[in-house]
Image (cartoon, rainbow, N blue to C red):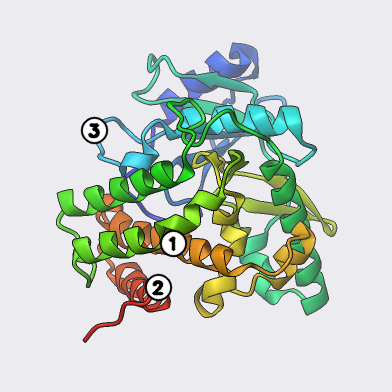
Amino acid sequence: MESITKNRQSPEVLRAIVERAYGRDRAPVGDGWVSELGHGWFNVAYRIRLRDGYEAVLKIAPPPGVEVMTYERGAMGTELAALDLIGTHTSVPIPRVDFADRSHELCDADWFFMPFVDGDNLGMVGPNLPAREWAAYREQVGAANRQINSVRGAAFGPLAGPGDTSWRRVFTDIVEDVLGDGERRGVRLGWPYDTVREVLVEHAASLDEVREPRLVEWDLWDSNVIVRDGKIACVIDHERAFFGDPLIEAGFTGTQMAAAFGDSTHFMRGYEHPPLTETERVRRRLYCLHLVLIMVIETAYRGHTDTASYVWARERLTEIMALLGRTRR
């Protein structure tokens, strides 16, 4: 996916980065040792073959001169912290961090290396799989997500803090940051910004039911799952993790917006989550609201020239506003 947040580097810089991480004796020579992995939306990622045949993936954070959304600031630091937490407390397969550098000495942003994991991207191959195989993978994703959510935090909010004991305050601030990002760039939602704020306030009491901070990925879509031989080989892209309510996870989105985001039945079976209560349904709708607001507003921050994503997301915003009791007169 194309985005102005992708911080592409020259072969000379990439070779210097490889040398710092793996040593000069393993640095690649000749041509054909690097290729860009193009399916991500935010960071640039390169597949690199070292001189001894070892294959690694290099992720580089966006350049400092490109404005990102508030919640995306420091995203690579968040990913490194999330990888440490998941690796320490769960058996979920994740990439090993070979080397990380946040000095900005070789390029203008944070970067890190991890091993290349061979397999298929579930988001790409899933729709073409036999129904039983697809369901089995979705159940595995649910089970893995439950493991991740088993990690407890000291407070709600960013992994690096500051935290808060109130999920209502934290989530309200999260949405306000998104709305502020949209207002700053003049993004038209199709709804008055203050109307969206009113809807959040009207249903905010449902958030008070959440009392225990849990590690949430938030971005665990099928496109961030690598599969091989009938099993999850690796879960990737952890830069949007925080301590919050597990119900905000992507796998639950289809409980309220199945037509747009797919059915959550198999995910929930793997997660072993019972049917949502009425309060949980309200809360999940607020999380859908948060998600589609980001999808609308981030198009201005990605530098998209094609309006298709923006138009699609605005339609989803109208759908979720209706589920929360607001329709256009």
- 10 Å crowding of disc 2: few (<14), some (14-19), many (20+): some
Q: What type is the residue that disc 1 sits on?
A: Leu
Looking at marks 2 and 1 on the same chain, the residue that comes earlier in the sequence is marked by: 1
Q: Nearer the viewer, residue 232 or 315?
A: 315
**Rendered image quadrant of residue 109:** top left
Q: CA distance from mark 1 to mark 3?
A: 32 Å
Q: Which residue is mark 3?
A: 65
Label 2 amino acid?
A: Leu
Q: Evaluate whether residue 231 shows in this view.
A: yes
**Place of residue 237 in the rendered image (x, y in percent of width and height, measured from the top left):** 56, 43
Q: Which residue in the structure is indicated by mark 1? A: 286
Instruction: Say which quarter of the image contains residue 182.
Output: bottom left
Is residue 21 toward the left or the right of residue 9 in the image?
A: right
Q: Nearer the viewer, residue 263 or 191?
A: 191
- Regarding residue 7, the answer to whether it shows in the image is no
At a point 78% along the width and 60% down the height, the residue shown is 272
The answer to whether the residues at label 2 and label 1 have Cβ atoms under 8 Å apart is: yes
Element class at badge 1:
helix
Residue at image point 50% right, 66% down? 282
Marks 2 and 1, how far apart at CA: 8 Å
